[in-house]
Amino acid sequence: GPGRYRMGVPVLSLGYACLAGMQVRNTAQVYMQELADKAGDGVLVALGGRDDMAMTYIAAARSQGVISLQLSVGSRISLARSAIGQAYIAGTTESERADIIDRIQMRYEPDRVSEIMDKLDAAREQVAARGFYCMIGDWQRDVNAVAVPYRSQQPDTPMLAFNLGGYSFALPKERLEDDLGPRPVELVNMGNRVGY
């Protein structure tokens, strides 16, 4: 019927990584929505998987009220340049990371490559030190975000990442780093406990 046809549209663009993450999505969605509601004011919480050189959102939860980012399930954002992509790369295996870096070097101009590599190092350091990576107005000028890599306990599920982001007026740097940054880390810890 028509319901089945509608379903087919976003799923086709998701790719294997994201289909494998569906089980995670079904369980994580409730906790993501709780976090979005607690964070309030224009916050979008997302779960994404890698699809070539993009991160594709496989789950999204937004707070009520103030306008939030126009991204949702099926949205694709840059693997190399977004907070969620940088956090994903920070958490992945050495071999996948090396492969991604090769592709970055082929795809971008040399000065852009060194800029991206600096961010990758920063993401790795921040994730190691405090569990999350914070990106302020970098990929999109008026958008701030924190992101955390996540390896699911579901069998055969690839590396994923959580993201909490929004417009900079709602998410100033201090609020992100001190208050909201640890929240996606809690999503990861919760996932380890309840097994999504």
Image: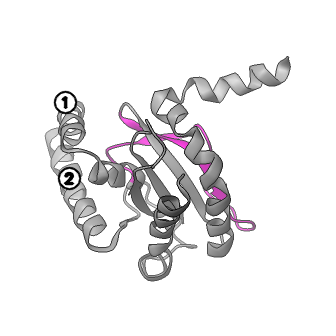
Q: Residue furthest top?
A: 1
Residue 164 at what x, y percent from top left? 51, 62
Q: Please indicate whether residue 72 sits to the left or right of residue 95 in the image.
A: right
The mark found on residue 106 in the picture is 1
Residue beneath disc 2 = 115
Callout 2: 10 Å neighbours few (<14), some, many (20+)?
A: few
Across and down, in percent, residue 1 comes to 85, 17
- The picture places residue 45, in percent across and down from the top left corner, at 57, 59
Quarter of the figure with residue 141: bottom left
Element marked by disc 1: helix
The image shows residue 76, relative to residue 184, as above or below, that is above
User: Three-letter amino acid code at disc 2?
Assistant: Glu
How many callouts does the rendering have? 2
Q: Is residue 37 above or below residue 85?
A: below
- Residue at left 60%, top 46%? 25
Pick whichever, 44 or 29, lies toward us: 29
Query: Which stretch did the figure color magenta?
Result: 53-82
Given residues 130 and 10, the one toward you in this image is 130
Element marked by disc 2: helix
Q: State the predominant SS element of the stretch in magenta.
A: loop
